[in-house]
Image (tube, rainbow, N blue to C red):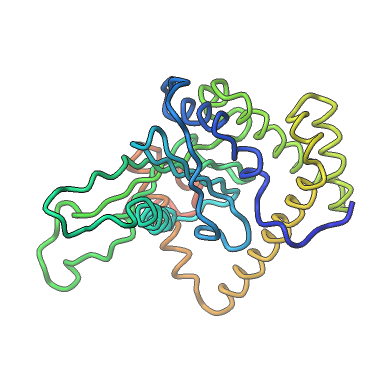
């Protein structure tokens, strides 16, 4: 198979860019049953969240609900800020032509934000990332401490690796199959040095064992290209991280770990579990 360097979709968006399938996905994520007569329409924006791949999906439910979903193999602690920017652009698109200066209030859809994690590193089943975690503290200017921010946005991060959040993947078989496909691909990439051969073997295995079989039969060549492109991007990220380390950006990394630790503490995780996830010492976690 020849690698095409021009792909912009990821396997995730290619698979889930279908309104009927998104109905099942949202029902699973929200723990609800979305009636079949409620229309679902995709309004994904181009090249907003991700640099080279559309790893995000935005869709409306009945014109009253907007759901933003992004798939990630590495959790970014800035996701709440990125979702904030994304939702702003979605709103701008939806209310275009309406006057913001009218005496009547403009109704906007209810937003929900999800990140589906399918990476190789251990991660909790569920975690909430908050925009307020990124805010600077006004008391550092000598001002009184604020009890709560006047602006907030929360992103629910769900681990969809095999064996995680089984109640969700059971309600949406395609999510379960997608998770199994990613797991199997990672297994082959670990054991076979030739990346192209590893991806080919993964696709063959999944087709043989009814894992995204129909999807892979139709889009096998595209999936092959997408996986290699995403894998190459992961390699590039490692290089960027190494360069950032060499340039003395370790302080930023520590802040990222601390933000994750604060979220885990808020969710009631033990100090030992947080230490395993972040690498921070027990004393550092206790201070948080």
Which residue is at the front of the view, 87 or 175?
87
Name which quarter of the figure residue 206 lies in. top right
Q: How many marks?
A: 0
Residue drawn at x 63%, y 43% as measured from the top left:
12
Residue 197 placement (x, y as % from top left): 89, 48
Task: For residue 142, say whether it is visible.
Answer: yes
Residue drawn at x 42%, y 26% as measured from the top left:
38
Q: Is residue 167 left or right of residue 78?
A: right
Residue 274 placement (x, y as % from top left): 45, 45
Answer above or below: position of 16 versus 147.
above
Q: Is residue 203 left or right of residue 176?
A: right
Answer above or below: position of 257 versus 24.
below
Answer above or below: position of 129 versus 159.
below
Residue 174 placement (x, y as % from top left): 63, 28
Q: Is residue 228 left or right of residue 127?
A: right
Which residue is at the front of the view, 193 or 182?
182
Judged from this view, the residue extending furthest toward the front is 97
Q: Is residue 67 left or right of residue 199?
A: left
Answer above or below: position of 275 versus 52.
above
Task: For residue 283, say whether it is visible.
Answer: no
Residue drawn at x 42%, y 55% as measured from the top left:
86
Residue 181 placement (x, y as % from top left): 72, 35
Which residue is at the front of the view, 91 or 149?
91
Judged from this view, the residue extending furthest toward the bottom is 247
Name which quarter of the figure residue 218 lies in. top right
Which residue is at the front of the view, 264 or 182?
182
């Amino acid at each position: 198979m020849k690698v095409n360097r021009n792909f912009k979709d990821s396997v995730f968006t290619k698979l889930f860019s279908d309104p009927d399938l998104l109905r099942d996905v949202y029902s699973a994520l929200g723990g609800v049953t979305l009636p079949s007569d409620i229309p679902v329409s995709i309004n994904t924006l181009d090249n907003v969240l991700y640099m080279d791949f559309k790893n995000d999906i935005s869709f409306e439910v009945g014109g009253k609900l907007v759901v933003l979903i992004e798939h990630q193999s590495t959790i970014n602690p800035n996701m709440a800020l990125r979702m904030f920017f994304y939702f702003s652009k979605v709103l701008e698109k939806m209310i275009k032509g309406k006057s913001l200066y009218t005496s009547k209030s403009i109704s906007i859809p209810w937003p929900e934000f999800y990140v589906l994690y399918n990476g190789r590193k251990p991660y909790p089943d569920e975690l909430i990332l908050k925009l307020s975690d990124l805010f600077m503290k006004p008391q550092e200017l000598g001002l009184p401490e604020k009890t709560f921010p006047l602006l907030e946005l929360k992103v629910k991060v769900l681990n969809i690796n095999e064996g995680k959040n089984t109640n969700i993947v059971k309600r949406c078989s395609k999510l379960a199959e997608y998770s199994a496909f990613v797991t199997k691909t990672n297994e082959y990439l670990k054991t076979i040095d030739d990346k192209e051969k590893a991806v080919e073997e993964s696709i063959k295995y999944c087709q043989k064992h009814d894992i995204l079989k129909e999807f892979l039969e139709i889009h096998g060549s595209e999936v092959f290209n997408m996986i290699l492109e995403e894998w190459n991007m992961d390699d590039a990220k490692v290089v960027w991280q190494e360069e950032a380390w060499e340039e003395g950006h370790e302080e930023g990394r520590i802040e990222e770990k601390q933000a994750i630790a604060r979220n885990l503490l808020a969710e009631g995780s033990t100090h030992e579990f947080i230490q395993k996830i972040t690498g921070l010492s027990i004393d550092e976690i206790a201070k948080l």
